[in-house]
Image: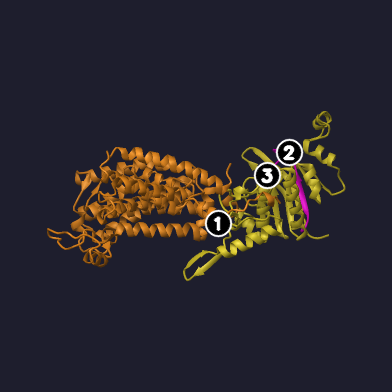
Amino acid sequence: MTAPLIEMQDIEKHFGAVIALGGVSFDVLPGECHCLLGDNGAGKSTFIKTMSGVHKPSKGTILFEGKEMRFDSPRDSMNAGIATVYQDLAMIPLMSVARNFWMGNEPIKKFGPISIMDFKKANEVTMSEMKKMGINLREPGQAVGTLSGGERQTVAIARAVYFGAKLLILDEPTSALGVRQTANVLANIDKVRAQGIAVVFITHNVRHAMAVGDRFTVLNRGKTLGTAKRGEITPEELQDMMAGGQELATLEGSLGGTV
Amino acid sequence: MADERIKQVSKLRRAMIRPELGAIAGAILVFVFFLMIAGDSGMFGPKGIQNWTVVSAQFAIIAVGASLLMIAGEFDLSVGSMIGFAGIVIAILSVQWGWPVWAAIIVAFVICVALGALNGFLVIKTGLPSFIVTLAFLYILRGMTIWLSITTTQKTIIGGVKSAAEGDWLAPLFGGTILKGLFQWFADIGMIDTFTRGSRMGQPVVEGVPMLVVWALGLIIFGQWLLTKTRFGNWIFAAGGDAQAARYVGVPVNRVKMLMFMFTAFTATVFATAQVMEFGSAAADRGLLKEFEAIICVVIGGALLTGGYGSVVGAALGALIFGVVQQGLFFSGAESSLFRVFLGTILILAVILNTYIRRLITGER
């Protein structure tokens, strides 16, 4: 068995008197897609924010490639090779695709003491990386606002991969998307995983998780309810664990199993 | 993906559809209008051109700062008060305290840029809207200016800067003119009228390009270059477009905003210094309403009030429209109160057009 890329041990996070995370352990292997499931308020977002350096855990250790890490800022975790794509904050719609793609990592051309942004390189790389992900841009100067939600998530994923992410955290990338766009994003997750990058896929949609996940961890009220491998668990069991069991069973009956 | 739904866009349309389009259209409109109603009034003679160029350049100087700050997602309402403050500081130091003018100018710049940094610091640390923080400084600085002026001189106007600046090395950088030889030559070949009487007989009516105009052009070029060509420019867009998203990818948003507040203060001080050198005096009420005039220029120029989108060249064109309208109504002999009516109308029209263009570009719905 390969060593996990990242290991989160007994992570606790307290906000004042509120215990958002009460001891969560979780690990991701290289080249696997580990799905983190849970209902709203389960602590998914808080948990990934400790992984991406936004929050510092109140207790617990983070091991990345076997070394203990302390992330003081998103920059730290990014430098270590952890990239996070947030659902709403993936892209800036008013800016062009190329400007978004390179945001924070702009390529530079130097003329003596003066340095300017290398737009030729930025544009070429953006176009070719987008093509690899199946998005044909009209031009790199096209504003992100003209792209669909799925395309925006894809640009963000392509950006993370291009800048050498070893671990890609996707925060509900499919929750606001239509069927076709969801399929595209899931296909891209599969592509990324095939390159050996570890993926943490946060969702509350069991079917999306089942489509690409290798392992599944369910969070509920700040605690893990356990981790299961693909094939060891049915979608119905996952659904039940997320909802905390009983209430949904009756509701599901009346809805004809559509939840 | 949905290729078949992406329409090919013609080159012409792509060249046309840009943030400055509204301001370009407005500028053409304004020039045509005044050529028609004031074409024979001397407005487009050498002296007339100098007149509205200088006024436009004044607006442009503060509009460059305001536009970069607005694109970075913040406002500065203290620009006008800062202009009055900087002027009084220069006058008190040089005339009252007898400092050399260059030292007074440098100290004014240092104090004002530090005040800009304080504005930025408060906005970043408190998380309050910059509208409120800088509104407070609009009052604080104006009050300080009047108080400083009255306690040191018992007056609100301090004169005598011109004689103090005699022979100073830094003052001509703000108050002088350049290319005098060229303009003399223009006069010699008859392109520019010369004075026919008085002590300046034989000299051209326009003696050269005022430093104010040089500053304006320099700042416009620098601002446009910074915004569109550099890494820092990308950060300005990102900070104003979505500060949180920008932070998550490692853009130093706070530093960007802070520097833009300082740059805005710098442009206000350039304006103030040039004005003091031109008039030879400072007055505590200088710069009144300039903050709004700067914001109007920026908005006419196509910038989005909420940040993340805009153009420095657009803001400069906004300043040109502002200057031409203000001086044009004077040349055409119209009632000067109509200036504001005209300006308000242009503002509305430009913003409607800009909103439409922006939607085309950014896909906003």
Q: Can residue A73 be seen in this view?
A: no
Pointer 2 residue: A39
Residue B269 position within the rendered picture, expressed as x and y whole percent measured from the top left: 33, 53
Q: Which one is closest to the eye, mark 3 or mark 1?
A: 1
| Relative to B107, B361 lies left or right | right
Question: Badges 3 and 1: C-beta atoms under 8 Å apart?
Answer: no
Q: Which amino acid does label 2 sit on?
A: Asp
Element assignment for label 1 = helix
Mark 3 neighbour class, 10 Å CA radius: few under 14, some 14 to 19, many 20 or more: some
Question: Badges 1 and 2: C-beta atoms under 8 Å apart?
Answer: no
| Relative to A228, A192 lies left or right | left
Alpha carbon distance from label 3 to label 1: 45 Å
Pointer 1 residue: B11
Q: Which residue lies furthest to the right in this view?
A: A232
| Chain letter of disc 2 in the image | A
Foreground pick, B360 / A253? B360
Q: Which amino acid does label 1 sit on?
A: Lys
Residue A248 in magenta stretch: no
Pointer 3 residue: A45
